[in-house]
């Protein structure tokens, strides 16, 4: 079945982790017919190159605490172009419902009575696990999978109180947007009760030609050893 965009509709589309081969067929077909594309900074150029040649591409990324555009500005762009009868793709890296601001965008679209659809994408954790050929859950090591983000913390991550009970030994912890202070993060996790010798893997620019993989433990991870953003940090016995 051929999928094309409808005028005046906003699509919250997952662009996957970076490799265009990991786009869903629906995401690809929508990209090829959209009038306007509003991509995050983390959406790769290879993915953007698949958009219709006639599409208006307006980057709306927010990186390292220095946004080029506010979230309200993104809402305004979606509403402006959809109200003018254009089909709009809000293109988010990974999956649009995992650690993005999809909730705020859904609320804005609903309040303005703009029709919208959500197109899931492959979140970075699954792409990293596939690249490492390592299951995130394992019958002998991890029966639980926890997704978290450190992005919301400005100064101190303060993981000790919230992870003391939430991270059991038989779990794999995946931290999105861990920041650059890996040693401090590791110390906080150790202080919360996680064993210092717990294996961890930091993956930079997953699934792209610039991917970097750094295998270590919580006790030995250092700030400078991990590649450039975006970075995903996996922690737990299943990834050893």
Image (spheres, rainbow, N blue to C red):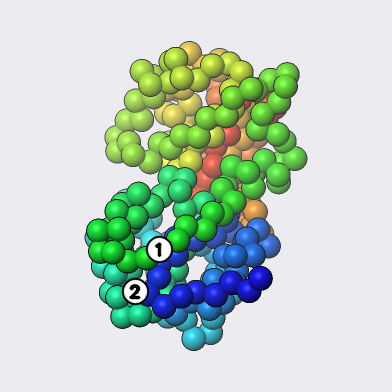
Q: CA distance from mark 2 to mark 1?
A: 10 Å
Give the left or right position of residue 169, taking residue 165 as reference: right
The quarter of the picture where residue 139 lies is top right
List x then y, in percent, for residue 116. Answer: 40, 63
Question: Of callouts 2 and 1, which one flags the residue occurring earlier in the amino acid sequence?
Answer: 2
Q: How many marks?
A: 2
Q: Indicate whether 14 appears above or below 140.
A: below
* Disc marking residue 145: none
Q: Indicate whether 65 appears above or below 112.
A: above
Residue at 45% from the left image edge and 48% from the top image edge: 97
Q: Quadrant of the N terminus?
A: bottom right
Residue at 32% from the left image edge and 66% from the top image edge: 114
Residue at 35% from the left image edge and 80% from the top image edge: 85
Can residue 173 be seen at all in this image of the molecule? Answer: yes
List x then y, in percent, for residue 218. Answer: 55, 25
Q: Which residue is mark 2?
A: 82
Q: Which residue is mark 1?
A: 116
- The secondary structure type at the circle numbered 1 is strand
Q: Indicate whether 84 appears above or below 129.
A: below
* Foreground of the two, 13 or 173: 13
- The secondary structure type at the circle numbered 2 is helix
Can residue 90 be seen at all in this image of the molecule? Answer: no
Give the left or right position of residue 23, taking residue 135 as reference: left
């Amino acid at each position: 079945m051929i999928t094309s965009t409808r005028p005046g509709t906003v699509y919250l589309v997952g662009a996957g982790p970076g490799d265009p081969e990991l786009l869903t067929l629906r995401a690809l077909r929508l990209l090829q017919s959209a009038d306007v594309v509003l991509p995050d900074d983390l959406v790769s150029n290879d993915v953007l190159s698949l958009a219709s040649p006639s599409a208006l591409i307006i980057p709306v990324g927010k990186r390292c605490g220095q946004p080029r555009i506010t979230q309200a500005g993104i809402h305004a762009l979606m509403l402006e172009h959809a109200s003018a009868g254009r089909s709009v793709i809000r293109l988010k890296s990974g999956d649009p419902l995992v650690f993005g601001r999809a909730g705020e965008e859904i609320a804005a679209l609903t309040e303005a009575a703009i029709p919208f659809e959500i197109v899931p994408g492959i979140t970075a954790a699954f792409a990293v696990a596939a690249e490492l050929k390592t299951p995130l859950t394992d019958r002998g090591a991890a029966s639980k999978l926890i997704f978290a983000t450190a992005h919301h913390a400005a100064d101190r991550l303060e993981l000790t109180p919230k992870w003391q009970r939430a991270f059991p030994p038989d779990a794999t912890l995946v931290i999105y947007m861990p920041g650059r202070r890996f040693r401090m993060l590791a110390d906080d996790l150790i202080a919360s009760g996680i064993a210092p010798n717990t294996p961890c893997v930091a993956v930079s620019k997953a699934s792209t030609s610039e991917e970097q993989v750094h295998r270590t433990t919580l006790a030995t991870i250092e700030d400078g050893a991990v590649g450039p953003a975006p970075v995903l940090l996996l922690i737990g016995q299943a990834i050893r």
